[in-house]
Image (cartoon, helix red, strand yellow):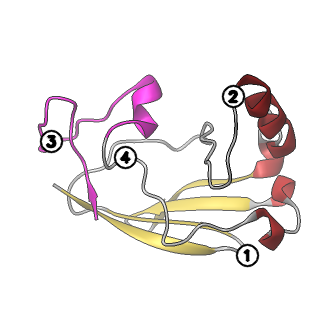
């Protein structure tokens, strides 16, 4: 369950962080239930990702539509800092971002890799 909380600890209302906080605050980056290794993906530049909120599709896009491709992203990141096995590079998101509320159900997935359901808690 994703617990939505503001930096001051408030857990009520539709508080939604802006800018770089979207992937930084505790409980905002839900990963799992497993991580897939590179050898299990035929072409990382051709992955379709999607997200629904309460059964309504909010996002659908492909890694092919990224401004910076996966391989180039890794090249850029590794030129600036050391990457280790298991490191995760966070990127932007397609349009469709919006507030969530306690009780909402997020389902997100990647064709060929699987999906996960994230109930939003307080």
Instruction: Give the quarter of the figure containing the N terminus.
Output: bottom left
Circle 4 residue: 28
Sequence-first tag of 1 and 2: 2
Residue range in magenta is 1-25
Cα–Cα span, label 1 and label 2: 30 Å
Residue to which mark 3 is pinned: 13
Look at 24% across and 48% down and name the residue there. 4
SS class of the residue under badge 2? loop
Q: Quadrant of the C terminus?
A: bottom left
Which residue position is annotated with label 1? 112
Q: CA distance from mark 1 to mark 3?
A: 35 Å
Task: Judge left or right: residue 82 versus residue 105.
Answer: right
> Tag 3, which secondary structure?
loop
**Residue 39 location in percent, x, y?**
82, 69
Q: 10 Å neighbourhood of mark 2: few (<14), some, or many (≥20)?
A: few
Q: Position of residue 70 (x, y in %)?
A: 80, 44
Tag shown at residue 81: 2
């Amino acid at each position: 369950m994703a617990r939505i909380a503001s930096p001051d600890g408030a857990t009520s209302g539709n508080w939604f962080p802006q800018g770089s906080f979207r992937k930084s605050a505790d409980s905002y980056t839900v990963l799992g239930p497993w991580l897939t290794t590179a050898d299990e993906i035929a072409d990382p530049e051709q992955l379709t990702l999607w997200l629904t909120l309460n059964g309504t599709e909010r996002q659908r896009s492909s890694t092919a539509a990224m401004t910076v491709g996966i391989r180039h992203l890794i090249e850029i990141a590794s030129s600036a800092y050391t990457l280790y096995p298991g490191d995760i590079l966070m990127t932007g998101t397609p349009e469709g971002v919006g507030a969530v509320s306690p009780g909402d159900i997020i389902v997100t997935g990647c064709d060929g890799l699987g999906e996960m359901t994230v109930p939003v808690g307080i």
